[in-house]
Amino acid sequence: MAKNLVIVESPAKVKTIKKFLGANYEVMASNGHVRDLPKSRLGVDVEHDYEPQYITIRGKGDILAALRKEVKKADKIFLATDPDREGEAISWHLIAALKLENKKVYRITFNEITKNAVKESFKHPREINLALVDAQQARRCLDRMVGYRISPLLWAKVKRGLSAGRVQSVALRIISDREEEINAFVPEEYWSLDAVLSVQGERRPLIAKFYGDKNGKIDIHSAEEMQKITKTLKGVPFEVDEVKKGERLKKAPMPFTTSTLQQEASKVLNFSTAKTMRLAQQLYEGVDIKDIGTIGLITYLRTDSTRVSKEAERMAYDFIEAQYGSAYNRKEDAGEKKTDRKIQDAHEAIRPTDISRVPVLLKDSLPRDLFRLYQLIWKRFVASRMAPARYETTSVRIAAGDYRFHVSASKLVFDGCLSVYAHDEEEKEENNMLMKSLDRSSKLAFLNFEEKQHFTQPPAHYTEATLVRALEELGIGRPSTYAPTITTILARRYIVKENKNLYVTELGEVVNHMMKDAFPTIVDVNFTANMEMLLDGIEEGNVNWKTVVSNFYPDLDEAVKQAEQELSEVEIADEEADEDCEFCGRRMVIKYGPHGKFLACPGFPECRNTKPYFEKIGVPCPKCGKDLAIKRTRKGRKYYGCLGYPDCDYMSWQKPEAPAEKVKNEAS
């Protein structure tokens, strides 16, 4: 009997897939990559056509030995690594590491780990797609060049242990730019005006919002403008001028991509991107379900496509018909969202492998967080195949002299996709009951005005979810890179996370400024997005991968050499502080450590005195009059606090302004 060897990436898949294939197949795992560039050097031979210098990864010797043993017994070898660039590259590396050139080797892929999908993949074996491999090799070489050439400069400039990366440096810049935008933001005043009216025959008042005058919309910028309007409106009758009724549709959401899954899991479940990907990997590779066994519950988790297979579409149609009725099925011509950006359309959207596995039936078999993520994916997919929700809308224009007020309301008349997935549905229905009875003949009586002062708000800090959305919209990175990128810049302490928000640390500011000054191209958003397009071109077979690498490296090399010269000239001297060491009397100096600046005695090692360094901002404390200084929380977030602490507990997240008298004196 012929013996077949199937090699997958993850040990978690072995048991699941072996159960589908039977005794004639041996299934083993490579545990991810088996070959990579060496850690000790660049590993790309820039003198000889940029040839990568791959070596066996340390610790993989035993795995490769076990695989070689099985290879000798096998008549056919099936490489079943993940269905993406990286998976293709791992299969290619396995051929080299196991010396499979003269063996019967077949590449198979499946988008979900189910019996049908796995067995079907054996009916369509193919050769290694070298275009995919080349795209992955190009990415790996580019990332290695950036990391291994620029990181030593960071060690020299700041401290050892830091790193630069092609995608992570751009992500850090995006966060830093937002922080600068927030710090530079100047709030602008504006006002809102609501008229509280009574409707004849109704007990509840009607709230109408100021719109403008008969010529169009008017914004109210100050209390003076507000007073002028309310004064003009004094004693003016309020009359219904126009009533418009209509319909509004809320379309079904798209099924999840990697990016949208990370965003929604953050918003709804409060999961980090890393946690979402870890749990999704488990759901994809297989979970032990009571009375069923180990089965993959979702399709492949790294995708930016919203496409759904015909078979899954048909199953969803039948399920919705049976459970909700034909009115809830979406029309067949409701196509997916179109995009100009290249997507990895070999994959489907993330969906349940079997829609009939309703979350409630699996609750006892899944840990809490795994269940919550599966439920989110299941609901999103079912809702994506459903008809849109339908609302009745009413818009009323109210005339008061030359001014106009508006009232609008909507009422849900058909829940459609909202019957399954309504996380972000926050419809207000405060005026709904009153709107039914309103028409041109309705009598209105003025009760009072509600005037409110507002100030424009700065842009919000990035969260992991909004950063992922920004990276995706800018075309930076790919589904598999979002979570590791954020994890890396958090681990390097370039950014910190507090209450979901991401803040740049002092260390992050220094690294970002250095990258912008010395390597503006590397941290340029458009350049990085264009590089992703070139990688897509390699995958499509339109671009030679070594051309991309050879065009990139000389400019990088020149920039590094120039930066090395400039850095050698700019010696970071110890800046003297205005404090003396209380132990030896020397003037303390400002040093830079992994967590920012600190004061140290220059008499080291004889005197080892150190203390925190606080940068004064030239503004006195409004409570006690002592100097205010920039301080940082334990997690690295910046705030402004009094140097008189603990006697004075004043602190502020926003930079306090100097008193007007002091500003005037300094100006004179």
Image (spheres, rainbow, N blue to C red):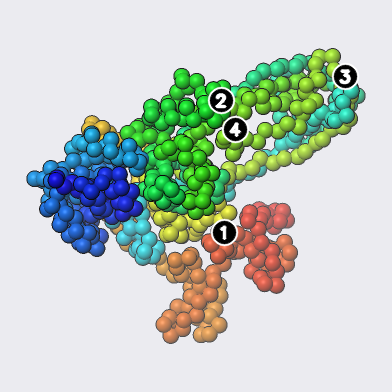
Residue depicted at x 25% and y 60%: 39
At 70% across and 17% down in the image, what residue appears? 245
Q: Distance between the residues labelled 2 and 1?
A: 55 Å
Q: Which residue is drawn at 76% across and 15% down?
A: 242
Q: Residue 443 — which label?
A: 3
Q: Which amino acid does the dot numbered 4 rest on? A: Ser
Q: Distance between the residues labelled 3 and 2?
A: 44 Å
Image: 263 above or below 209: below
Looking at the image, the residue that sits furthest to the right is: 235
| Residue with the most extreme left position | 102
The percent position of residue 85, horizontal first and vertical second, equals: 28, 42
In which quarter of the view is residue 43 placed?
bottom left
Residue 179 is marked as none
**Amino acid type, residue under disc 1 in the picture:** Lys
Look at mark 4 in the image and give the residue it sits on: 419
Kind of residue at badge 3: Lys
Quick one: 519 or 473, which is closer to the camera?
473
Mark sitting on residue 325 = 2
Q: Contact, CB < 8 Å: mark 3 with mark 2?
A: no
First of labels 2, 4 by sequence position: 2
Secondary element type, mark 3 = loop
Binning the other alpha carbons within 10 Å of mark 2 as few (below 14), some (14 to 19) or many (20 upward) gives few
- Residue 377 x, y percent position in the rendering: 48, 40
Nearest to N terminus: mark 3 or mark 2: 2
Q: Is residue 290 visible?
A: yes
Q: Is residue 260 above or below residue 387?
A: below
Classify mark 2: helix, strand or loop.
loop
Q: Mark 1 points at which residue?
A: 638
SS state under label 4: helix
Circle 4 packing at 10 Å, graded few (<14), some (14-19), many (20+), is some
Task: Tell me residue 363's x, y (percent).
Answer: 52, 48
